[in-house]
Image (cartoon, coloured by chain):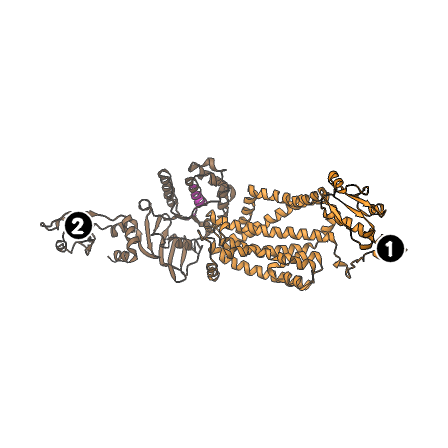
């Protein structure tokens, strides 16, 4: 294990002094921040500017309609008989319509538009619906209060039976973001690990290193080293991101973090890393370079993505049978279990069974990978075929 | 004997036997040349010695005084592989310290030795350069340093001279000799026969995974270096030679014949025995060089070599 530590610290140091790694370390949160900030900014930019409709009011209902419309939709009354088309075009209005008796009887109205703005049209439609209801009920003696009562929509409030099952949007968001971050790290660390194995081969260093330590130690060292690098990245990003989030996002993120099921996330994050790192380090040993990955290799690279298939069903029904399956199946369990823990109280037996399955799978993968690694690291000039890999798996170990 | 003992190692991949019952010794203080055509099994043998792969049969023993270990301890091996490379984006000194660290050399000591070696090879300015900035020859020197920095008792050098200019070759030769005289067992694998002849005390020649010739270079030369006679004359005449002096004749073409003089027979003796009426058109008497032996083995395969062996 001492030799594995030497490899681990070498991998850490080598990456920490590598420009590319530093660049990624800094640029990734910037890109993430960009993805959060830009949509918010765009949303602000997209604040509805004033939209003007012209109306010829034969019903005397224009004032009521004005009150029903949101402030940015402006209604301007026009003289009957004026050239409304010319007016709208010259004043750059959005359109015009006539409020006539036929509207009250048929409920139909023609909107002549210059500029189709679906948001404004939908606001207008809502306001006109309300107006129509008022106009039609005006004769029947129903007051506006009674009308409001009659047309009110049902309100459903969700009350959880158990306190811990209480879904709080804020917690869900933080928990999901945290899960995403951990899984992102599992995936990037795995990929870096694979690159590191490929690089060891490409730089023709494997033989020299393996004349000093055993393949198992080299593999362990790499796995531990990239785990530490992952932690360093996570720590760096949290240190950078938390103050930012507290300052700019308008909810108490620290309190929400306390509500996140940290033990489950960390345990399954680690489990996921063990499994996928073993998979990726073995995979790296079978490859000549990343660009020429064969079909079988590409499929293995995609395996961690499998969890994404289950995102929809798990979020919409976190206790359904699909969610339970996905949180037990080792290839998806780490991501899904982390995610589910934020949405619902996962039964203890599921947590334990899932953890056991994940660990057993990780252990078996690790053993298989070690066999692939010891042969693959010394093979130069080509990608291994699945048949060759199968043969390596059956070699006896010295 | 102190040094490496390889005892009957065999390695098969599937139905192909890559190394077949190979035994030899690399004594400390000597340079052993491991020779063989491409694909003869040299790299596999080296990897088994290094413990990178395990032999199916046989064993590798390393003796140091009364201390005998199965396989060579990692800390005692220095290895310069044929497939060469260094971490491209890392700095020279840092790589040397890392590799020395893997061999358990204390950091301060490793730094001191690394700087000494770099100075010796005229690379003191490169200590903080990245490997990708070095020329091929410079990188090779760095790798040589990495192989010997921890003062190994057993050094494996696989094609150490390829790509080196003559000046650097001489530098390497001197260092390799110094390694041996400092008490290390050196195993040198190379295709450059002139250098092997110059450097090696002992030779081990393999082909197709089997041992072909081994032993002290001088004795090999005496054994296989018996004079070789090439004659250009008519066939009937060739058969009239005194068979007491020469081995069996080999017919190269219609009028060209080759024979090897029996051990101890001097060229003058042979020439005196030539019939006076011999219509000799050409006569060459030469001693096969290591190069010749190697080429014969590589071209003629193991059978030819076995014939050499039988003589």
A175 is higher (above) or lower (below) than B134:
below
User: Chain drawn orange, letter?
Assistant: A
Which tag is nearer the camera, tag 2 or tag 1? 1
Residue at horizontal 66%, vertical 56%? A338
Q: Which secondary structure is most common in the magenta stretch?
A: helix
Q: Is residue B184 magenta?
A: no
Task: Tell me, yes or no, whether dots 2 and 1 are on the same chain.
Answer: no
Check the image and name the residue furthest to the top: B125
Crowding near pointer 2: few (<14 within 10 Å), some, many (20+)? Answer: many
Q: Position of residue B151 (x, y in %)?
A: 44, 45
Q: Disc 1 designates what residue?
A: A137
Residue A248 pos. (x, y %): 72, 43
Residue B84 percent location from the top left of the image: 43, 46
Q: Secondary structure at mark 1?
A: helix
B77 or B278, nearer to the observer: B278
Direction front: furthest residue:
A81
The subunit letter for the residue under badge 2 reads B
- Which chain has been coloured brown in this picture? B
Subunit under mark 1:
A
Residue A217 visible in the shown view? no
Residue B176 locus on image (x, y percent)? 38, 44
Q: Nearer the viewer, residue A3 or A336?
A: A336
Considering the numbered disc 2 on the image, is that residue within a helix, a strand or a loop? strand
Identify the residue under disc 2.
B231
- Where are the magenta residues, as a range? B141-153
Name the one closer to the observer, B44 or A1.
B44
Q: Image quarter for residue A358?
A: bottom right
């Amino acid at each position: 294990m001492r030799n594995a530590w030497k490899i681990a610290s070498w991998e850490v140091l080598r990456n920490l002094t590598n420009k590319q790694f530093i660049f990624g370390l800094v640029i990734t949160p910037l890109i993430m921040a960009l993805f959060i900030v830009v949509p918010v900014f765009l949303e602000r930019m997209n604040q509805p500017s004033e939209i003007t409709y012209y109306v010829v009011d034969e019903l005397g209902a224009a004032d009521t309609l004005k009150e029903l419309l949101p402030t940015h939709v402006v209604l301007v009354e026009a003289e009957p008989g004026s050239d409304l088309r010319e007016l709208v075009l010259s004043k750059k209005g959005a359109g015009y319509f006539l409020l006539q008796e036929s509207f009250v009887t048929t409920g139909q109205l023609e909107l002549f538009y210059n500029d189709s703005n679906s948001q404004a049209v939908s606001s207008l439609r809502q306001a006109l619906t309300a107006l129509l209801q008022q106009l039609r009920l005006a004769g029947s003696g129903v007051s506006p209060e009674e009308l409001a009562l009659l047309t009110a929509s049902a309100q459903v409030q969700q009350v959880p039976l158990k306190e811990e099952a209480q879904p709080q949007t804020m917690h869900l968001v933080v928990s999901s973001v945290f899960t995403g971050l951990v899984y992102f790290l599992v995936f990037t660390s795995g990929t870096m690990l694979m690159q590191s194995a490929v690089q060891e081969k490409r730089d023709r260093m494997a033989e020299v290193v393996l004349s000093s330590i055993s393949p198992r130690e080299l593999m362990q060292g790499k796995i531990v080293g990239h785990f530490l690098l992952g932690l360093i990245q996570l720590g760096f990003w949290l240190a950078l991101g938390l103050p930012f989030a507290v300052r700019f996002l308008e909810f108490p993120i620290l309190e929400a973090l306390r509500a996140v099921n940290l033990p489950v996330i960390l345990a399954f994050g680690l489990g996921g890393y063990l499994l996928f790192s073993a998979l990726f380090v073995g995979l790296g040993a079978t490859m000549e370079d990343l660009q020429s990955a064969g079909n079988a290799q590409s499929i293995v690279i995609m395996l961690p993505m499998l969890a994404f298939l289950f995102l929809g069903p798990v979020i919409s029904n976190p206790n359904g049978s699909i969610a339970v399956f996905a949180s037990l199946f080792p290839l998806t369990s780490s991501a899904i279990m982390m995610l589910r823990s934020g949405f619902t109280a996962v039964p203890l037996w599921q947590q334990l069974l899932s953890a056991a399955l994940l660990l057993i799978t990780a252990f078996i993968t690790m053993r298989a990978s070690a066999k692939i690694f010891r042969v693959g690291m010394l093979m130069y000039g080509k990608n291994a075929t699945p048949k060759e890999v199968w043969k390596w798996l059956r070699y006896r170990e010295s | 004997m102190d040094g490496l003992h390889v005892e009957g190692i065999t390695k098969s991949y599937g139905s192909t036997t890559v190394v077949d019952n190979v035994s030899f010794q690399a004594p400390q203080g000597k340079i052993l040349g491991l020779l063989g055509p491409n694909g003869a099994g040299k790299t596999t043998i080296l990897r088994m010695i290094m413990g990178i792969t395990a032999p199916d049969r046989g064993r590798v023993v390393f003796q140091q005084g009364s201390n005998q270990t199965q396989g060579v301890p990692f800390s005692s091996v220095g290895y310069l592989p044929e497939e060469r490379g260094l971490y491209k984006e890392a700095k020279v000194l840092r790589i040397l310290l890392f590799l020395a660290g893997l061999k358990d050399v204390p950091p301060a000591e490793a730094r001191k030795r690394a700087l000494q070696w770099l100075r010796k090879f005229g690379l003191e300015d490169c200590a903080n350069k990245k490997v990708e900035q070095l020329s091929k020859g410079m990188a090779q020197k760095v790798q040589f340093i990495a192989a010997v920095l921890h003062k190994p008792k057993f050094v494996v050098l696989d094609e150490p001279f390829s790509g080196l200019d003559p000046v650097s070759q001489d530098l390497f030769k001197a260092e390799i000799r110094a390694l041996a005289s400092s008490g290390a067992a050196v195993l040198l694998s190379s295709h450059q026969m002139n250098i092997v002849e110059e450097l090696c005390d002992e030779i081990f020649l393999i082909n197709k995974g089997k041992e072909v010739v081994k032993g002290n270079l001088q004795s090999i030369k005496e054994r296989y270096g018996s004079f070789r006679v090439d004659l250009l004359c008519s066939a009937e005449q060739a058969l009239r030679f005194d068979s007491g002096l020469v081995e069996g004749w080999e017919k190269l073409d219609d009028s060209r014949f080759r024979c090897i003089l029996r051990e101890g027979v001097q060229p003058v003796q042979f020439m005196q025995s030539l019939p006076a009426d011999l219509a000799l058109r050409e006569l060459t008497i030469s001693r096969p060089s290591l190069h010749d032996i190697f080429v014969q083995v590589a071209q003629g395969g193991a059978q030819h070599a076995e014939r050499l062996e039988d003589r």
